[in-house]
Image (spheres, grey):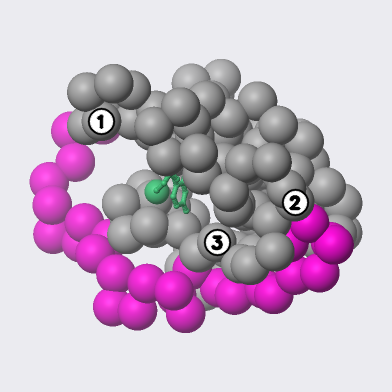
Amino acid sequence: MENKELVEKALEARSVAYTPYSGFRVGAALLCADGTVYGGCNIENAAFGPSCCAERTAFFKAVSEGKREFSAIAIVGGPAGKEPEDFCPPCGVCRQVMMEFCDPERFRIVLGKGDLSFREYTLKELLPLGFAGDGVERKE
Ligand SMILES: O=c1ccn([C@H]2C[C@H](O)[C@@H](CO)O2)c(=O)[nH]1
Ligand SMILES: [Zn+2]
């Protein structure tokens, strides 16, 4: 799928962001290796801590439906009431979640804006020397 189309889907996902505390609405569209796309938005909470970013919402939706292989994620974000005018790079926690499921040299992170312009990075570029759990015992 074209990056532009993925950015459009991220903008669509952003429209239902739940952000009463920050007013900063983020949307993500996660492209699975099988071609399916999962949208995600940020979901905030009055206790702040339980809030979830758009990117993790998309990943957890996909993994909870059996998906394990991912090609790319588009991310858009900015203040409510207007289309995103700046790029919104993923937070460190979300980069680490990507590291769990994605090949850092192949997984593409597409940062988009409301005008559908975008910049593409690999996960390795945004999370150099990322921790992949090498040496961590796996039970299954
Ligand atoms: O890449 C990002 C950056 C921030 N947020 C959310 C967290 C919070 O709800 C709001 C402001 O930080 O935006 C995301 O969902 N993804
Ligand atoms: Zn995040």
Q: Earlier in the sequence, mark 3 or mark 2?
A: 2
Q: Earlier in the sequence, mark 2 or mark 1?
A: 1
Residue 32 position (above or below residue 64) = below
> Where does residue 98 sit, x and y in percent of width and height?
43, 52
Residue 39 picture location, percent across and down: 66, 33
Dot 1 amino acid type: Phe
The amino acid type, in three-letter code, at marker 3 is Cys
> Which residue appears at 19% of the width and 41% of the height?
138
Quadrant of residue 80 in the image?
top right
Neighbourhood count class around disc 1 (C-alpha, 10 Å): few under 14, some 14–19, many 20 upward = few
Query: Any magenta on residue 128?
Result: yes
Distance of mark 3 from mark 1, alpha carbons? Answer: 20 Å
Which residue carries the number 1 mark? 48
- Disc 3 element: loop
Q: Which labelled disc corresponds to residue 83? A: 2
Is 66 positioned to the left or the right of 116 in the image?
left
Q: Secondary structure at mark 1?
A: loop
